[in-house]
């Protein structure tokens, strides 16, 4: 899925809309398949962070995936998006901004799902059953936002 924001989906050339993701998820669930929804935190940059969080939560709520897997945007070599980052046209989120986007996203999720952010691109690993572990997960994100940004992983460009 990566995002629930159609503007972002067009910009990253996903080839699908938010409605496409919702419909595909609902059909797969109806067929008895377990849905894992991958979300790329920060993929909208600073310009679309709020909208990305809100619209992605909306799609998750309609899709009702069994698992939501959080990844943080890392620009990859030889991609138009990396060129935009390097030229200053795409403003990446700082660690604190990614954590704020994660909070905004999760605070808007209303369906039962497993949430996990266990990936090397992330600034913080949070995981749990939503909504049962909601308070613990949100508090971990709030606590991490109080840390100095220099304590998080450094910026890097992906090579894969």
Image (cartoon, rainbow, N blue to C red):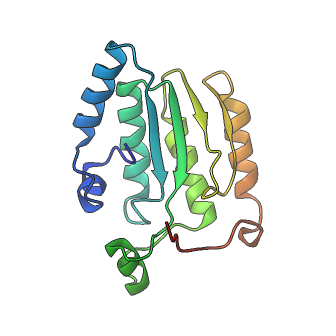
The total number of labels drawn is 0
Front residue of this view, candidates 3 and 14: 14
Residue 120 in the figure: left or right of residue 36: right
On-image quarter of the N terminus: top left
Image quadrant assignment for residue 31? top left
- From the top left corner, tell me how far across and down residue 133 is, in percent: 69, 27
Name the residue located 75 percent from the left edge and 58 percent from the top edge. Answer: 146
Residue at 23% across, 35% down: 19
Q: Residue furthest bottom?
A: 87
The quadrant where residue 34 appears: top left
Taking depth in this image into account, of 111 and 78 the one nearest to the observer is 78
Determine the residue positioned at 67% across, 39% down. Answer: 138
Does residue 4 appear left or right of residue 104 in this picture? left
State whether residue 157 is above or below residue 114.
below
Give the left or right position of residue 33, taking residue 150 as reference. left
Residue 32 lies, in percent from the top left, at 39, 13
Which residue is most to the front?
Answer: 160
- Tell me where residue 28 appears, x and y as whole percent: 33, 22
Q: Position of residue 24 (x, y in %)?
A: 27, 29
- Between residues 156 and 135, which one lies in front from this camera angle? 156
> Residue at 49% across / 31% down in the picture?
109
């Amino acid at each position: 899925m990566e995002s629930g924001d159609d503007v972002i989906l067009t910009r990253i050339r996903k080839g699908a809309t938010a409605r496409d993701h919702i419909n595909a998820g609902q059909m797969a669930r109806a067929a008895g398949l377990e849905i894992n929804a991958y979300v790329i935190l920060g993929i909208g940059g600073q310009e679309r962070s709020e909208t990305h969080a809100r619209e992605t939560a909306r799609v998750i709520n309609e899709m009702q995936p069994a698992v939501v897997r959080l990844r943080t945007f890392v620009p990859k070599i030889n991609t138009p998006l990396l060129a935009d980052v390097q030229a200053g046209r795409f403003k990446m989120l700082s660690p604190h901004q990614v954590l704020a986007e994660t909070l905004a996203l999760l605070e808007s999720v209303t369906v039962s799902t497993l949430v996990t952010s266990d990936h090397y691109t992330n600034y913080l690993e949070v995981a749990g059953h939503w909504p049962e572990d909601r308070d613990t997960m949100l508090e971990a994100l709030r606590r991490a936002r109080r840390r100095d940004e220099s304590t998080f992983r450094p910026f890097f460009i992906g090579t894969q």
